[in-house]
Image (tube, rainbow, N blue to C red):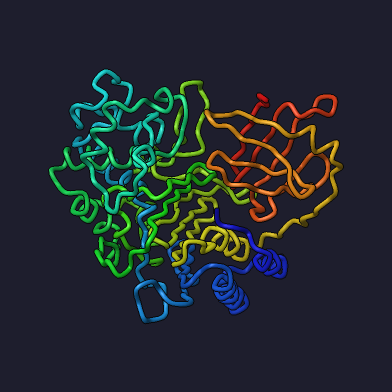
Amino acid sequence: MPRILPWIACLTMGMAGVRSQEGDELRHALERLGRGALEDGALGLTLAVDQGGAIVFAGGWGMAAGHDAQAGPDTPFVSGPLLGNFLAVAALRLAERGEFDLAAPLAKLVPGLYADRPEITIDRLLTHTSGIPSYGELLAAERRQAAAFAPAPILAWLKTAPLDSEPGSCASYSNTDDFLLGLALEQASGKRLAELLEAEVFGPAGMEDTRWRADPSERHASAHLDQEFGGGVTVLGDAPPPFDADDLHSTALDLVRFQRALLGEKLLKSASRELRQEAAALADGSRAAHARGVSLTALGDLPRQSAGGGMAGQRVHVAYYPTLDTTIAVLASGAEAPSESLERAAARLVFGLETAEVRDLPLPAAERTLHVGEYYAACTSYVITEANEHLVLVMPGGERHELLYQGEGRFLARKHRDLQVAFELDDGHALALILTERGVSLRAVRVA
């Protein structure tokens, strides 16, 4: 998971109180921010900031993958993790014209799949509440890595694979949802997906540099995938992305154009825009931290609509802050490039947000033991263990976060300062934990 790094923390603290959205001081600080990212995993990257329809900063550092020239705001990078965002807009545009029924059962557009489960609708694919497992499980079960995306074996596997959860009960990212949504859109429109997205999204938004660019020289040995979703990151292993999305490239400037087009009438009418950013409803009456193609997160008290992830050794992250009408887009080469932490740090600079003091208070072994256990929430298990005299949070995908004690039952992750943990205690024993990540909170009850 991308990190909040010490050099970012120092830089944002040094800029605390800066309220101007323009000026040399801010631009120089963002330049330092970009150069600093090259020292921590980024081979090349680009950053663009749009406020109110004006580009207030656009820059690039290092080299773009597969290119000899320095990266700049118009340099194309892999943007496949945004495929779901683009699919959602295309689906809503077709629905506006009556050419695509979001309430239709999936089986109506993809015959032979889930004919006995009419509650698996197109909209459940859009909101990732279908319960359908990621097709990476197919590759893991067969103990192989597929070099390229192949629809036929996935469709065959789905006919017998059990659901991960009951439709509507959980929101959980599944690349199979994006795959099936793409098939349904192709069926409804009569166009191949690349052609459809050009006609319905890239063209109307003025995204002239966004397209599929098949270039084997840019492919990496590992097709490792991860996807930002609902305040967290879902690791998808080495499964090939749907519709060869690792060949989908965009630029920082095109991504801010996309967001700007969403705010007017170029892409969606007002009712569709509202539906796109409406939190997914779950069967128990609660709301997920995800809408249609975007995660509903926050930076401090600022609401944020965000999307991104990594594939083919590159990373992309874009965030829109509606209350301040600001879009920040980051694209980078390097599987460990800190794309999202760079965006958050840039936002703190632009908005003049202060960075809270981080402490590492001692917690006696006897007290640490009272917190160790398994916690369950939202169809997901979290584990608290200990190592090196600290509590450690083990996420569902196996990612480990060492927790720094802040006092009064509060903890911060050492390498991800936007991940906070607090415990509900009874007579010293932890009964539940409150996990807050990127402004999204959940309560997990202790089960072991």
Name the image quarter holding the C terminus: top right
Picture coordinates of residue 19 (x, y %)? 65, 66
* Depth order, front residue of 231/373: 373
x then y, percent, for residue 135: 34, 39
Q: How many marks?
A: 0
Left or right of 323: which side holds 163? left
Residue 214 percent location from the top left of the image? 24, 64
- Which residue is situated farthest in the top direction here? 116
Q: What residue do we see at 36% from left, 81% from top?
A: 68
35 to 16, vertically: above or below: below
Q: Residue furthest left?
A: 190
| Left or right: 148 as drawn, with respect to 252 | left
- Between residue 4 and residue 381, name the one nearer to us: 381
Q: Residue furthest front?
A: 143
Q: Could you tell me which residue is drawn at 60 percent across and 51 percent down?
A: 299
The answer to which of 183 and 31 lies nearer the viewer is 183
The image shows residue 112, relative to residue 38, as above or below, that is: above
Q: Is residue 54 left or right of residue 14?
A: left
Seen at 48% across and 72% down, the residue is 43
| Residue occupying the point 79% across, 47% down | 389
